[in-house]
Image (tube, rainbow, N blue to C red):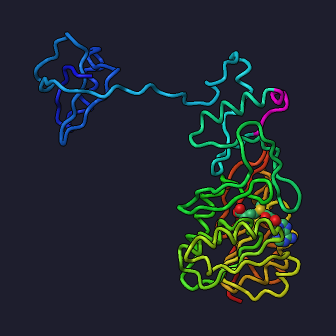
Amino acid sequence: MSGAGLKVPRLRGEEVRRLLAADGLLDPHRAIKKEAEFLVFPLVPGRPVPASWGERVDRTFEPVSPKGPSDYRELLPWPSAEKRSLPRSFDVVGDVVLLRIPEALEPRSAEIGSALLSFVPGARLVGADRGVHGPERRRSVERIAGTGTWRTRHRENGLEFDVDLESAYFSPRLAREHELVAADVRAGDRLYDLCCGVGPFSVLIARDGRARAITAVDSNPAATSLLRSTLGRYPFGSKVEVVDGTLESFVPVAEPRERVILNLPHEGIKYLPSVARTVAPRGRLFYYEVSSRSDLGKRSEGIVDALAAHGSFRVVDRHVVHPYSPSSDLTAWVLERGSE
Ligand SMILES: C[S@@+](CC[C@H](N)C(=O)[O-])C[C@H]1O[C@@H](n2cnc3c(N)ncnc32)[C@H](O)[C@@H]1O
């Protein structure tokens, strides 16, 4: 699409773009061109432009590609009152899309699924997420659109994790938390990743390379098998020792280490007295819990008390990882053991 344009130094680009747009002189159907230190704005044909705004030139412009929808709900031809009850957000794990569907909309799941399948770039499968259950926190998912299995590869913190949404716990909402914990590991630290799942803490810490020893423990063989599969693809994979086992059998015989992660948010509290002894003096415990929003101060005291049987711990950080329910959050505590 060739036509008239206005050539302007980049430094004046925004100023001139506003002037052209305000006077309706900028052609919205053709794309602005970049030419070294200049921009060339496509002009609406036959309209004069003040000479002081830039140099008039002739150019070939690319057409502006039409904008796609910015929200999957725009793809559903439903009355707006019905659309309002659709969830706004959804999770993407690898090429799988997960969303929680309100009960009243379940009969329309297939429509919602196919809207998401075309909305999310690269999506292969869409599932209704019915939450995680049981001690192994396995997710109940039901296919509502797309094909294939729940196994996928998810990119997080520059790494690719083997994940199977049905057989082992994984949440894409913990990426920042995995990163925070990894950043706290010092050169030479030894670490336990208790309840490691598919290993997002351990693999990242191994990749970073500062830890001297990393042991990842989980009772779900599907989780440890996925973790082994991820580790097998990386040159640093051998740094992680993967243990198939329960906390009940592992913790009582574990030697103390400088960094310990305990990510079992609904039941972790019952393991705290025994886990306390696995934290070396001046070492840190990263502990996660789903806690009521109203009494976090008291909760901190309860956690420190639970650890007290095997040492004195103090809270060095506490933060919300993400909201869990209208009245509770997934909360992270970082607890440091004294030097006794
Ligand atoms: C919330 S997931 C944590 C996964 C992982 N840390 C992450 O960030 O993705 C909890 C994990 O604890 C494991 N688990 C539950 N009870 C356990 C126990 N008694 N001993 C060992 N692992 C256990 C489950 O199999 C599950 O993989």
Q: Is residue 129 left or right of residue 72?
A: right
Residue at 84% x, 62% y: name it.
136
Range of magenta residues: 100-107
Residue 296 in the image, given as x and y percentages of width and height: 76, 57
Q: Is residue 189 above or below residue 72?
A: below
Extreme residue toward the front, this view: 148
Residue at 65% x, 72% y: name it.
202
Residue 274 in the image, given as x and y percentages of width and height: 84, 79
Q: How many marks?
A: 0
Residue 91 in the image, given as x and y percentages of width and height: 67, 45
Residue 2 in the image, given as x and y percentages of width and height: 23, 22
Q: Is residue 298 visible?
A: no
The residue closer to the viewer here, 173 or 288, is 173
Residue at 59% x, 61% y: name it.
160
Q: Is residue 49 left or right of residue 188?
A: left
The residue closer to the viewer here, 5 or 313, is 5
Report which quarter residue 263 is drawn in: bottom right
Q: Is residue 96 above or below residue 298?
A: above
Q: Is residue 115 above or below residue 238?
A: above
